[in-house]
Amino acid sequence: KNRDRVCDEKKITLDVALDRLGFGRVHLLVIFAAGLCLLTVINETMGIGMLLPAAQCDLELSSTDKGLLSAISFLGILVTSHLWGYLADTRGRRQMIIITLFSTAIVTILSSVAQNFTLFVVLRFLSGVSISGPSAAIYAYLGELNSTKNRDIVITFTCTFAGLSSIVVPALGWFLLPQTWSIEIYEGFFFRPWRLQLILHTVPGLLSAFLFHFLPESPKFLVAQGRTEEALSVVKWIHKKNSGEKAPELDINELTSETSGLVHKNNFLKSMWNQTILLFCFPYLVRFLIYCFIQFGIFYTCAGVGLWFPDIVNRIIQAKTEESRTLCQTFDFSPNITHLELQEDFCDDSINTDTFIYNIYYGIIYVMGYIILGFLVKYFGRRTLLAGLLGGSALVGLSLLWLTNHSAIILFLAMHLMFAGVSISVVNSSIVTFFPTHMRAMAMCITLMFGRLATFAGSNIIGYLFEINCQFTFLISVVLMLLCGISAIFIN
């Protein structure tokens, strides 16, 4: 009996085992590798907007072409999110992250030498297809390697790397894009600075994929698949690396299994359907729909409106006078300079350096927001933080309709976008916590798919709405933030 009691004490759940592991060197490496992955996701999806003015002459881009290129990677993410969610839940998080990061790098390098618009569009679409995988699976992996008490803090601080992209991309652009060097690879094809920057955008992803080769598969995924012995080996490996080679071995003999995951079966489509339909069953349906709506509203604001941030700031600067004007009044007095015009005999692809400076300031505000949120998440619940952030975004956005100071308008616009953007980490942390392991990546991918849909739709219609009714454009964003803040009350 005593021997049985001792054996039972050494047979524990994975959550208890993760609590015993605490936080150490392996977890820091995971944060760094996952952070580089998120940095690459934002570089690939949002960074293209910074390069378009410099690329317009080489690719002979019209205004319509630029709009398509800004959104095409999100279309790639949209059409494959469901598939990547299924594969991450049935084949594993780590393997999928490594493969998709390497494939993203390959496609991006190929797109850097694309000679015409059509080929460039196709390759940027494939870049979106590839980057769709790690953009969601990384959150599941992060949450599953950390204890419950550390999960929210770890995810929030890791998301700081996403904010860093808003500094890294314009900083690179500030250094590279004004340069005029050109290397002729063969007759008629020149390798110019914007092509080099496109390659540099994917370098963090290559480094992340390399680091993931030294990291284990998610132990929660292994347990959910019934591979408890492999999961126990992972837990003991983490303990050994965190504590040192001379530390005593973790005194655990067996991990108890949680709800069994859906193992890959021969009928791919049926297996994928069975994996998906679980999200639309009790007790997950209502919460799942709320998450989808919140992701849609957040991404419409932080990414859809955010893609227009450089253009809005540019208009404010161009129309700057001593006369007091609101943001929408400024639009009425400023020329539409969203895109550089191609002239018959001369193509001007120069870029005003002020654009880079304001985007760097915007990135700094984002990073500060993530850092502050990382400390606040310890003391406030997800529901309170999320409702506060989204309500704050709505309030700041509403004030844009009456503010007349140009500097205040730019600052409040950046805060409107930042409050929405940093709340993504809170939502994703809640999704990781709520859904069981065998549904987690699928839930993350589909909810983020709604976010990408909002980005794709928002980035394409906002430009037209600005010209038709500026105030209505911002009111849409404000109302969405308010409704999302109310919806946040119903999640934990």
Image: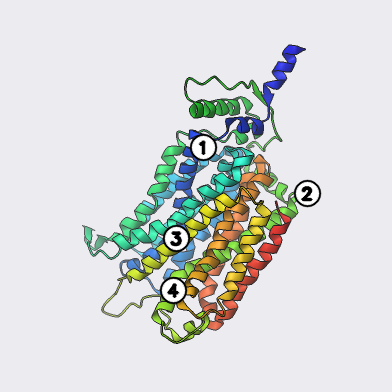
| Alpha-carbon span between mark 2 and mark 4 | 46 Å
Q: Nearer the viewer, mark 2 or mark 3?
A: 3
- Callout 1 touching callout 4 (CB < 8 Å): no
The residue wearing badge 2 is 282
Label 4 belongs to which residue?
A: 313
Q: Amino acid at mark 1?
A: His
Q: Residue at x 52, y 60 (%)?
A: 75
Residue placed most toward the observer, 284 or 321:
321
Mark 2 or 1 closer to N-term?
1
Q: Secondary structure at mark 3?
A: helix
Q: Quadrant of residue 489?
A: bottom right
Q: Nearer the viewer, residue 430 or 177?
A: 430
Q: Could you give the CA–CA distance between mark 2 and mark 1, rounded to whole angstroms?
A: 34 Å
Check disc 1 and report the residue beneath it: 27
Residue type at the position of mark 3: Gly
Circles 2 and 1 in contact, beta carbons < 8 Å: no
Between the residue at mark 1 and the residue at mark 3, the CA separation in whole angstroms equals 26 Å
Quadrant of the frame with the N terminus: top right
Left or right? Give the position of 149 relative to 243.
right
Mark closer to the chain start, 1 or 3 = 1
Q: Nearer the viewer, residue 492 or 217?
A: 492
Q: Position of residue 249 (x, y in %)?
A: 55, 20
Residue 126 appears in the rendering:
no
* Residue type at the position of mark 4: Val
- The image quadrant of residue 49 is bottom left
What secondary structure is found at the residue carrying circle 2? loop
Image coordinates of residue 156 in percent, x first then y, are 55, 49
In the image, what residue type sits under mark 2? Phe
Binning the other alpha carbons within 10 Å of mark 3 as few (below 14), some (14 to 19) or many (20 upward) gives many
Residue 344: x and y in percent read 29, 80
> Which mark is in front, 2 or 1?
1
